[in-house]
Image (cartoon, rainbow, N blue to C red):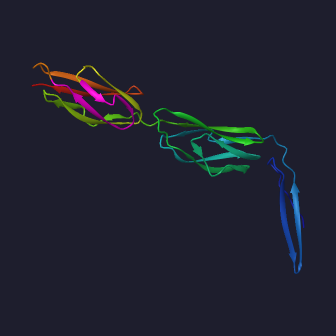
Amino acid sequence: VVLTAAPNVIQEARVFEFHIKSGTLSYDLNVSQEAGDEPLVGSFVPDTLYVTSTGGLQTVSLMSNTSWTLQFCDWVSSLTNAGVGDATFDMIVDSNQGSETRTGFVNAVHGGQVLCTMVIVQEGKPDLLEVDVDQFDVRPEGGEFSFHITSNQSWVISTDVNWIHPTPESGFANTDVNVVVDAMMTTHPREGYMVIKAASGKTVTVTVTQQH
């Protein structure tokens, strides 16, 4: 029996086990092969991964000639954490709840040495800032009303007059805003504005008119 072993391109020793049996006789043969002597290499495909704000399942490949473990940033995870040689694996990227693009990483490590790094670039959520009503007509004796802000970021409310009182004047994400309008002291019609400004700089305006 002639056994032919292919070159070991992996930087790990390996063992082949053979079980030979003839009638009632059997023999176990172990063949060991030393580790390859090529330099340690590793590379991700792709080396930079671009992900939408919703995140989700991503499939990537790692090309290497040695054993490795994976290190992930805190918003990336995988059921595959270690292996030897080339591998393709799935990982989960969490959704990005912020409006800003964020950058993370996956490292392949061998013996404390980083073999290669994949950069993960995830876009932020769309710049969301909306109100359900953008104009109110209020009676001369004043009154109270509310509107709803839909947003994925922090925001503040400012007014250009002292007779419109929104509560709260700042917040984060989706919120109901209550507004109290003072009674008119004259018979002249008046108009005021509430400007809602998000952290990104986006604004929307709610107009309040009051007249006899």
Check the picture and name the quadrant holding the C terminus.
Answer: top left
Q: Give the x, y percent position of residue 77.
A: 60, 46
Say above or below: 113 vs 212.
below
Q: Residue 136 sits in which quadrant?
A: top left
Q: Which residue: 21% across, 33% down?
A: 144
Residue 101 horizontal side relative to residue 114, left or right: left
Q: Which residue: 86% across, 59% down?
A: 4
Check the picture and name the quadrant holding the N terminus.
Answer: bottom right
Q: 61 or 56, which is in the foreground? A: 56
Q: Residue 176 sits in which quadrant?
A: top left
Query: Which stretch did the figure color magenta?
Result: 164-183
Residue 16 horizontal side relative to residue 174, left or right: right
Q: Which residue: 23% across, 27% down?
A: 207
The total of numbered circles placed on residues is: 0
**Residue 169 is a magenta residue:** yes
Say above or below: 194 vs 176.
above
Q: Which residue: 49% across, 43% down?
A: 95
**Residue 35 is a magenta residue:** no
Q: Main secondary structure of the magenta part?
A: strand
